[in-house]
Amino acid sequence: MNTSTASLTRSRRVERLVRGQPTSDGDGVRLTRVLTQPLQQRLDPFLMLDAFGSDAASDYIGGFPDHPHRGFETVTIMKAGRMRHRDSVGNVGLLEPGSVQWMTAGRGIIHSEMPEQEQGRMAGFQLWVNLAAQDKMQPPAYRDIAPADVPQLQTADGAALRVIAGQTHGLAGAVTRPTTEPLVLDIALRPGGRLEVPLPAGHNAFAYVYGGVPLAIGDQSVASEHMAILANDATADGVLFALPADAAGEAHVLLVAGAPLRQPIAQYGPFVMNTVQELQQAVSDYQRGALAG
C-alpha cells in the first residue's frame, strides 16, 4: 500500500533523551535495557524495553530458559535470528526475522525462549506492557504473528512502516488491545523521507532510534541507540519524523504509545502487580507450582 501522511497541527517535542544500559538476562544474554524501572510511571503503561543485537553467538546462545511471568504482557519483535518459544500452557512457536510474539502472562505462565542457531546475527526487541488491575489475573494467552501478517505500508513521503499494534494511516495493526490501546510501529525513513503519526494527546509515547543514521523527531536530532521520551502536550496532535535528503543512509525507529493506567506498580523481577501482598502471593504460587494453574 502506498499512501501519503495526514498533516499534523503540531508535533510533540522531545522531552528527554535516554541512552540504554548494557546488562544481561536469561542465561547470560547480552542486551541493552532502554526503558528501565525508574521510567515506568512516566511511560505508563510500558514497563520495560530491551534491545538485543549481536553477531557473536556467545552473547545469546544461552537464551532464556524456563522462567515465570504474571501481571503483564510481553511483546517480542524479531529483526534477525531465530528463537523457539515453549510455555506451560502448551504453546510452541518460532520467532524468525520480521515476526512478532504477543504473550499475555495474566495470572501466570512459565516459558522459555531459546535460540535455534549457533552462529549469525540475533537482534530484536522485547517490550513489556502492563495490565490493568482487573485484568492481571486473566487466563494467559499467546499469539505468534508471522512476518507476512504484520501490516505494512510505504508512504509517498519516503517512509516504510510495519504496524505491529494499534491503528495508523487507516491501517489496523496485527494486534489491537483494549484499555492500554498500544500503538507500536517499526519505521524506516529513506533520505529525504518524513512521516507524521497522529497520537492521542493523553497517551504516553516514546521513540527508540536504532540501527541507522540520526533523524529528526519534532525539531530535535536523535542519534541511533537513543530513546526519545515524547512530551505530553495538549496542543500537539502527533509526532513528526524526518530525515535530511543528504543523510548517509536510512533511519530506523520504533515508536511506542499507549493509554496510561494510572495505577500503582509493584514489581519483583518477572512479576508485576499493584501491591506487595500480590507480589508475595505470586512468589508463593510459583514456589508451590501453582503460578500457571
Image: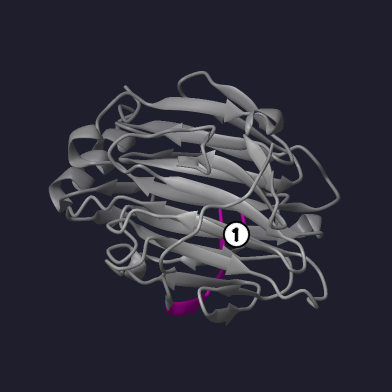
Q: Residue furthest top?
A: 90
Between residues 11 and 222, which one lies in front from this camera angle? 11
Dot 1: within a 10 Å radius of its alpha carbon, few (fewer than 14), some, or many (20 or more) residues? many
Between residues 175 and 278, which one lies in front from this camera angle? 175
Secondary structure under the numbered disc 1 in the rendered image? strand
Q: Residue at x 35, y 26 (%)?
A: 292
From the top left corner, tell me how far across and down residue 6 is, in percent. Answer: 52, 53
Q: Residue at x 65, y 39 (%)?
A: 152
From the top left corner, tell me how far across and down residue 226 is, in percent. Answer: 57, 74
Report the magenta residues as a range. Answer: 15-29
Residue 17 on the magenta segment: yes
Residue 189 on the magenta segment: no
Q: Which residue is mark 1?
A: 195
Q: Decide whether the magenta segment is chiefly helix, strand or loop.
A: strand
Q: Residue at x 79, y 55 (%)?
A: 57
Q: Is residue 29 visible?
A: no
Q: Quadrant of the N terminus?
A: top right
- Residue 212 lies in what quarter of the image? bottom right
